[in-house]
Amino acid sequence: MDKKRVLFLCTGNSVRSQMAEGLLRHLAGDRFEVFSAGIKPAPINPFAIKVMAEIGIDISNQYSKNVSQFLNDSFDYVITLCDNAKQTCPFFPGNTVNLHWDLSDPADAKGSEEEKLVVFRKIRDEIKDRITNGLI
């Protein structure tokens, strides 16, 4: 059985799409080939790495990629995780299912480190719920 190919797409490929990539690979990597990319890639946010490690998923070796490097690839699913990515997402030909999960950017969180981590955990858990209840 061929693995389904999934691309998670966000503006910076620094938080939401990286967490989604790590989660899906961890939960169903035997059934999915998982990628993530950004419209304007930025370094992975250390809080994303930290909250994923809390649930036993290491994304520290993942890195930000530009969506342009995937333009000639085909995907079963392209999942945008923010409105900006949805509006600027390039067209992927074929029988691609486009999904949109509008998730707030935890990188915008204000406050102490602990207060920021609470926001990152909330988004991580929301992504996990969407993957487990809608994708796998």
Image: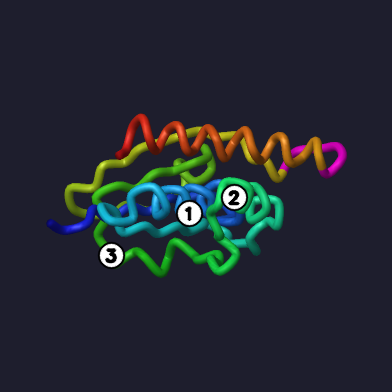
Mark 1: which secondary structure?
A: helix
- Give how far apart the Cα atoms at labels 2 and 3 are: 28 Å
Q: Earlier in the sequence, mark 1 or mark 3?
A: 1
| Residue depth check, mark 2 versus mark 3: number of the one nearer the observer | 2
Q: Is residue 125 left or right of residue 50?
A: left
124 vs 34, left or right, is: right
Q: What amino acid type is highlighted by mark number 3?
A: Asp
Q: Secondary structure at mark 2?
A: helix
User: Which image quarter holds the N terminus?
Assistant: bottom left
Q: Residues within 10 Å of mark 2 (few under 14, many from 20)?
A: many
Residue picked out by circle 1: 22
Residue 120 percent across, percent down from the top left = 66, 40
Q: Are marks 2 and 3 in contact (CB under 8 Å)?
A: no
Residue 111 in magenta stretch: yes
Percent from the top left, x then y, of residue 80? 44, 43
Numbered mark located on residue 73 in the image: 3
Q: Is residue 87 above or below residue 41?
A: above
Q: Amino acid at mark 2?
A: Met
Give whichever of discs 1 and 2 has the lower sequence position. Answer: 1
Q: Is residue 10 magenta?
A: no
The answer for how far apart the CA atoms under marks 1 and 2 are is 8 Å
Frontmost residue, 74 versus 122: 122
Q: Nearer the viewer, residue 60 or 42?
A: 60
Q: Amino acid at mark 1?
A: Gly
Task: Tell me which residue sits at (56%, 69%) in the image.
Answer: 61
The crowding category of the residue bearing disc 3, from other C-alpha atoms within 10 Å (few below 14, some 14 to 19, many at least 20), is few
- Left/right of residue 65 with respect to residue 136 in the rendered view: right
Residue span colored magenta: 108-113
Q: Which residue carries the number 2 mark?
A: 52
